[in-house]
């Protein structure tokens, strides 16, 4: 698999996992900086997925 596809797939999977964490585990009070907002949670998950997929 080419490195670009691996990076895109890792970022997309991470964003999905980040959103699922927000949806099912997320912070109910709104005080958690990452899991209280679905956009921030998905972006954070996407960055983590990208880093894990590229091995950096």
Image (cartoon, grey):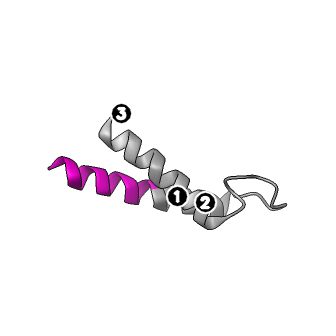
Q: Mark 1 vs mark 3: which is more N-terminal? A: 1
- Label 1, label 3: how far apart the Cα atoms are: 18 Å
- What residue is shown with label 3? 56
Q: Secondary structure at mark 2?
A: helix
Is 4 a magenta residue?
yes
Question: Along the horizontal axis of the image, is 25 left or right of 41?
Answer: right
Q: Quadrant of the C terminus?
A: top left
What residue occupies the far left of the structure in this picture? Answer: 1
Q: Judge the density around disc 2: few (<14), some (14-19), many (≥20) Cα neighbours within 10 Å.
A: some
Q: Which residue is mark 2?
A: 40
From the top left corner, tell me how far across and down residue 35 is, in percent.
Answer: 68, 56
For label 1, the SS is: helix
**Image-quadrant location for residue 27:** bottom right
Identify which residue, 8 or 24, lies in the foreground: 8
Question: Dot 3, crowdedness within 10 Å: few (<14), some or many (≥20)?
Answer: few
Horizontal and vertical percent position of residue 3: 20, 47
Q: Does label 2 or label 3 sit earlier along the sequence?
A: 2
Question: Is residue 11 part of the magenta span, yes or no?
Answer: yes
- Residue at the limit of the structure toward the right, as seen here: 29
* Circle 2/circle 1 CB separation < 8 Å: yes
Residue, x 61% and y 60% (percent of image)?
Answer: 40
Q: Which residues are magenta?
A: 1-14
C-alpha separation, residue under disc 2 versus residue under disc 1:
5 Å
Front-most of residues 44 and 21: 44
> Going by the image, does 50 lie left or right of 37?
left
Question: For mark 1, what is the residue?
Answer: 43
Image point (25%, 50%), residue name: 6
Percent of width and height locating residue 34: 67, 53
């Amino acid at each position: 698999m080419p490195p670009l596809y691996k990076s895109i797939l890792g970022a997309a999977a991470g964003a999905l996992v980040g959103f699922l964490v927000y949806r099912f585990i997320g912070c109910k009070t709104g005080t958690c900086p990452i899991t209280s907002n679905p956009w921030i949670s998905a972006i954070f998950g996407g960055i983590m997925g990208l880093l894990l997929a590229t091995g950096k």
